[in-house]
Amino acid sequence: MRYFKLVLFFLFITTTINAQKLMGFTDATAVKQVDWEKQFDGQLSAKNQDTWMQFLTSHPHHIGSPQGKINADYMAGLFKSWGFQTELAEYNVLFPTPKTRLLELLGSKPYKAKLEESILKEDKTSGQKAEQLPSYNAYSADGDVTAELVFVNRGIPADYDELERMGVSVKGKIVIAKYGGSWRGIKPKVAAEHGAIGCIIYSDPEDDGYAQGDVYPEGAFRPKDGVQRGSVMDMPVYPGDPLTPGVGATKDAKRLNRNEAITLMKIPVLPISYEDALPLLQSLKGPVVPAAWRGGLPITYHAGPSLEKVHLKLQFNWDIKTLYNVIAKLPGSELPDEWIIRGNHHDGWVNGAADPISGMVSEMDEARSIGELVKKGFKLKRTLVYCAWDGEEQGLLGSTEWAEDHQEELRKKAVAYVNTDGNSRGFIGAAGSHTLEPFFNEIANDVIDPQTGVSIKERKYASALVSADKAGRTKLMGNKNMKLGALGAGSDWSGFLQFLGIASLNLGFGGEGSGGEYHSIYDSYDHFVKFKDPGFQYGVALSKTAGRVMMRMANAEVLPIDVNSMYKTVNEYVTELKTLLETSRTETEQENKMIQDKLYDLAKDPKKGIQTPKTKEAVPFLNFSGLENAMMQLKTSTEEFQKLYGNSTQLSADKQKELNEILFKVERSLINEKGLPRRSWYKHQIYAPGYYTGYGVKTLPGIREAIEERNWKEAQENIEIVSRTMEAYTSQVQQAINLLIKKPF
């Protein structure tokens, strides 16, 4: 008997020693957590995800469509059956749809754009013409304009600098731009700033058509008449309903007049296929564009203007439509007022299989599996809130309105927000608040890639190393830490992270499911199961990944927040900014001297009419000392906290609760209520979408964009703002340190 007890004792010791360590858990609770996660994995079902996708993509499901409401009711019913307290949260938002679309080339070789996508027998939903939204850009202005055409490449500010050098003006013209390079709404915004009266956006085959691979249905890529729909709302100013900025678009909300809504485009905008773009581009004369501007069409790309004029006429129904968010809660048993929020949108431009239903069905499977665990006795400390957002495609409408409507409650209760969107075969992609970086690395190490049998972290590392250049490879070699990307705009985290200061993650697999179906009628179930994620292997992998994030955040004794990772990341950003300033100074000095020495005049081809650049104002020296001192203090505090964090699970329950509240609200200290220059809705001082990039993030945006725009006064002002922000962050960290030093175990 004594021998048997000794054996059991040594088995216990061995198990304890070999037990997996989890951030924020004791050894004992970590063992239980890992066991529940294994059970969670076993309940996930690729078959379920397939079945749900077939239903949810069976008809177009945009805002205001019959299928949109059917889908919301369907998902709400499922969440209820899984044990969630479920409701539909309704909001009334501005949603324009086209009444008139006309694009034609006039003159000796007239052409009328067909503005239609072909029905394919291989794609059973492509023929649902009566239910489909036609190809258009939401929030374009109404307009009837006729003018010469100019090609502006991607339509970003740097392209207009190049046009100026070529001696080409867009004032009073219609511009045509390629998709890509920035958020699509930037293209008409910048065009209007330069005096253009209309904008056409087309998908070049070099980007997602025949230059990339066989076109649909033989291959995954965009056929000649495929069109990318999309919103052109000026989202970098504020997302959500254009008429109710900062407040929820409830039935009784006070609304702006449409002419007061600054996120609506000022000129008419229309997306077209590369089939319709070809005759327009062939009509262009003027200088041949730089090599980097040329696409995959079999023509010589000219800047313009065209000899013949283009006629663009657009009219819209400016309706208020009801959207439906599904909100499903599993209350926590110990800390019900601490919420871990999970979201994916359910609306699509048409049938929307890859974007967004691939992510939605993964979230649903994840929620179902957790619900089953709860029925078996799994207890959640904190409340899980699962959301299916409506109206994301038009400008993050559903998530933004809910966040604005519940902002006071969310400031008090929201611990973290976890987002997904589209998903396909390939490598894990992760971006978000850098306090969550070590935590996510822990999870990425625990999830197995379905194709290779190694961890998704190991596979991501291999991909990064193989694709890196020599310098990057040297830096990466042996460093398997997975760096989180920073979040700009583009999906439903904005209301949580950038408006309210709630730590956020965005997750999804991709890289091996490329295609050209995006926002077209061909983003269908048939396309998805053939080219994106056959068998839903990566749908299940995403459920495993996000599910672990949710379950561990819900049950950690101490939240897995790493403030030192935030310090290290922000410090890198500060170094980047100082380098950016010095580089700008050197380049300005060099370029000005080249202009003064007439080197540009001597080097240019006199027959091409290239203009010599104008000299620029010298770059001043900015004072970073306040920010440097703030960062030094933050370094000291975060390093001290990380030394103490290991003992935090030994705190009493009351003190753990106190510590956790400090930790999940530390992200709030990165919010400045005055917001960023010219866009007060964006309040986070570390992450924001770029004013002229949209989707693309700008880190330390107030400082960075001021330097890029050569607004030196504003740059210095924002250095001081960020300095005070980092001091406030340090103060929060110090509160946590003081609590741990007292050691009330």
Image: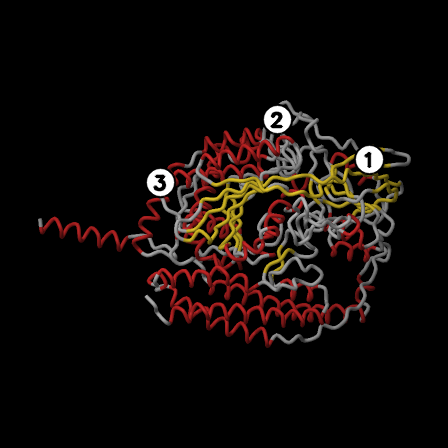
User: Type of residue at label 2?
Assistant: Asp
Residue 2, image x, y percentages: 9, 51
Count the marks: how many? Answer: 3
Instruction: Give left or right: position of 649 versus 399.
Output: left
Q: Residue at x 75, y 48 (%)?
A: 264
Q: Earlier in the sequence, mark 2 or mark 1?
A: 1
- Label 1, on which residue? 102
- 678 or 85: which is nearer to us? 85
Q: Which residue is mark 3?
A: 39
Residue at far right of view: 108
| Tag of residue 123 | 2
For the residues marked 3 and 2, what is the alpha-carbon distance in whole angstroms?
A: 37 Å
Image position, residue 612 (x, y; %): 82, 62
Badge nearest the viewer, 2 or 1: 1
- Indicate the amino acid at tag 1: Leu
- Dot 1 crowding, Cα within 10 Å, few <14, some 14–19, many 20+: some
Position of residue 641 relative to residue 267, above or below, is below
| Circle nearer the viewer, 3 or 2 | 3
> Could you classify mark 2 by the number of other residues whose Cα lies within 10 Å: few (under 14), some (14-19), or many (20 or more)?
some
